Amino acid sequence: MSANNYIATPKRTKEILANYKFFFKKSLGQNFIIDANILKNIIDHTGIDKDSGVIEIGPGIGALTEQLGLHAKKVLAFEIDQRLLPILGDTLDQYENIQFIHQDILQADVKASIRDNFSEDQDVHIVANLPYYITTPILTKLLQEKLPVESITVMIQKEVAERMAAKPSTKAYGSLTIAIQYYTMAEVVMHVPKSVFMPQPNVDSAVLKLTIREKPPVYVANEKYFFSMVQACFSQRRKTLRNNLTNYLSGEYDKETISMMLDNIGIDGMRRGESLNMEEFATLANTFYEAKQH
């Protein structure tokens, strides 16, 4: 197929929208990509090859789906918008390796879909152009379910991508950073201009690649408690660790006890949450969790 016939061109996208009298739903955060080169660059970063399986979330009219179909063995795409299914069925009719599931990814049993559609020894990747308003809930679900996938590559709001890939002691670093980097190695691999979308969004985009870790980089005694303590340390960014923890643990410990426990593990209570690396957060959470058990 010549590049001029790809779905991801302004001309072809406009034709498809006109043919099906399709209108964008703001509530679904729909922005379609109209530049095939951008899509090919994204796929280059994913590590997909002709033997790979791919899960796509929100295929839209199939711009990214088409490119995935050309590069992977099988593509399974989840689409929530019923109106798009007949469009996808027509525009991607010639691709026998693409299958659509009409379901909200937040409700889907993705693990079962992977088991039913891909072979056990196949490398599976998740690729998506995610709606900005629902990026974090989707990624949180996918990571917490510990899916048998190699990587998750997503186009998301630039600011959110930078928060997920941030380093300690930076403005972007926060509890979301820790949650993402506990499960993955996160890297912003591309910046994407607004001009390659229809309609143009109000914010800049970036492509974030999350390579799934075989095991977390730190030992934590209890994951739920670890994440709750991390959130507590960032609850008021300008406050010290000691003050944030005193607020969070009121009724359990007074300020002096908290100071003493922090001193015992070599963490200065006057520091702020953004200055701690993941190892320090793990030590802090494990210390307070173990104290709770006695």
Image: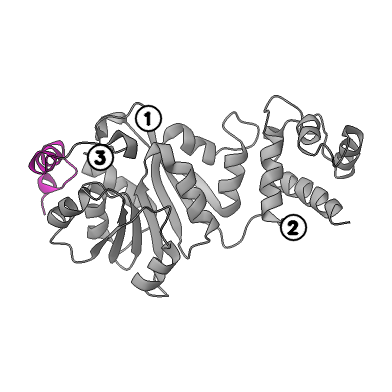
Side of 117 relative to 137 (left or right): left
Single out the mark in the foreground, 1 or 3.
3
Q: Quadrant of residue 9?
A: top left
* Residue 243, x across and y down, in percent: 79, 29
Quarter in which the C terminus is drawn: bottom right
Q: Dot 1 corresponds to which residue? A: 204
Residue 221: assigned label: 2
Q: Dot 3 corresponds to which residue? A: 32
Side of 194 relative to 227 (left or right): left
Q: Which numbered disc, 1 or 2, marks the residue that appears first in the sequence?
A: 1
> Cα distance, mark 2 to mark 3?
43 Å
Quarter in which the N terminus is drawn: bottom left
Amino acid at dot 1? Asp
Dot 2 falls on a residue whose secondary structure is loop
Colour basis = one colour
116 relative to 272, above or below: below
Q: Specify the segment rendered in magenta.
A: 1-21
